Image: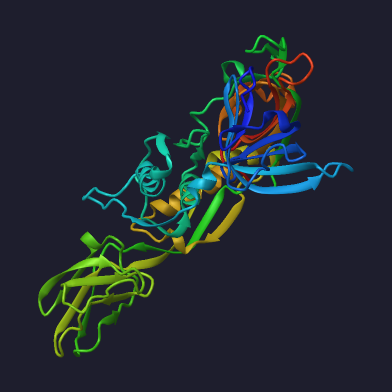
Amino acid sequence: MTALATGFQITLDGDDVSTYVDFDSVLVSSSVTVMTATCTFTVMIPDLEITRPISGQEVIITSEQGREFAGHIVSVEETQNGSTIGQLDYKVTCRDYAFQLNRHVAFNEFAAATVGAGGGYTYDEIVTALVNQYAAADGFTTNGVQSSYQAVYTRFDYQPVSDCINQLAQQIAWAYYVDYYRDVHFYDGGTTETTPLPNNTLQIDSATTITDSYGVYGQLGVYGDLTIKEDISQIRNRVYLYGHSVTANYYLTQRFTGDGNTTSFGLTYPPSQDLINNVLVTVGGGAYTCMVDLVDGTPVSTVQDYIAYINFTQQTVRFNVAPPAGTQIVVKYKPQLPIAIFFQDPSAAAVLAAQMGGDGYYEYAISDPTLNAETILPSQARAQEIMTKYGLPYLSGTFTSYLHGWQAGSYFTLKSAKRFSGQFATGQTMYVTKCEKKLVSHPTSSGATQPLFKTTVSWSSSVYVL
């Protein structure tokens, strides 16, 4: 079957099925909560004229503007159309290429930079490493991965690759998605991806229409049905963090005596994860190299390798071969000790104080052992995330738009001298959290020569989704 002359088509594994699609059923949705896009549509097949849609087939929807969606079918539902026995309808549900990226699970460990010694990985280097290792063979690229900053110690235990990347993005308030050409995008949370709005600004008081790029539909609606909501129920601007440990600034020495049989020796405290600088092990006076014990994964050899395997979870040091009876084992290490600390945002508190009186502070406490680290920087970053996410009144809303190119994770400026008592007169940055794109006109419609999508845009004042 040939493609439509207009360039608008829907293909399954390269075969054009456009003329069999109920265009009113085409819906594409993307959201920053999961950073994956989904698509649904119905294929109507009379009397077995073509092969039915099959789960796993590649779906590509294109128009003159480029790809509107691409991914794979994940489910197919067959129903009979009316009373005609031979007329069958197939409701197709698709996921974008992140579904294919998730066909592998990652088992990786990425060291953190050490004080004075450098090293470690940046967040973008971790993303690139994951894609190159697990997905390059499937055609995935990393052209959209932007340079970032040093990452904390990171480990993935058999987690889907796309989920790993999304987890990294959420940690540092960045955004992530896989585009419709299998390129991975990892970028600074909504501050680099712009919207199709003129000058990337929603001029509420004036910008209601714009000439469409097709030159077919005349004036298209820039926005419509705008709603704005303000919410303070989530306010948290003073955060207490506990239940985690930070590396001490002194060394603790523990001594053991070998008996010729014991290979594992318990430590009083969890040792620092900076094995190069903060953990020293000697056996019979000879220095051993320290490496991470991957919880019953190593050691496995019965040959002496002069390596001390440090297990952070079980608080042990293990050897491949038991030290001989009477041998002195000395472990000198910086312990990780429990700590409780709080952070606050005075500027956010001042906003609440002006509105509600008092000092404006709303407190929140969290216990998180995953914040164990060499310094307080991870806990500080976690507190900053919470205060950025919940520190100020949360503004959100929706509107509809006929412009082409909306993407969850982008940002725009909201301006109005009238809405919300002029609060947006000088402009405020907003972030697109979800897009639902529905095909409302297509080449087979009467008088239509190009497809037209209506997008429902959800947005908020925070780069985070509450």
Q: Can you say which quadrant of the picture contains the N terminus?
A: top right
Residue 425, relative to residue 49: is it above or below?
Answer: above
Where 144 sits versus 382, above or below?
above
Which residue is at the front of the view, 277 or 287?
A: 287
| Residue under the image location 27 percent in, 74 percent down | 299
- Residue 113 vertical position relative to residue 61 in the rendered view, above or below: below
Residue 145, located in which quarter of the rendered image? top left
Q: Residue at x 22, y 72 (%)?
A: 308
Q: Quadrant of residue 16?
A: top right
Look at the image and tell me whether residue 234 can be seen.
Answer: no
Q: Is residue 337 left or right of residue 347?
A: left
**Vertical order, 107 against 459 (above or below):** below
Q: Residue at x 68, y 25 (%)?
A: 423
Quadrant of residue 84 in the image?
top right
Look at the image and name its color scheme: rainbow
- Residue 431 percent location from the top left of the image: 59, 33
449 or 319, nearer to the observer: 449
Residue shown at the point (50%, 42%) measured from the top left? 173
Using the rendered image of the protein, determine whether residue 22 is visible from the camera's viewpoint.
Answer: yes
Relative to residue 151, is residue 221 drawn left or right? right
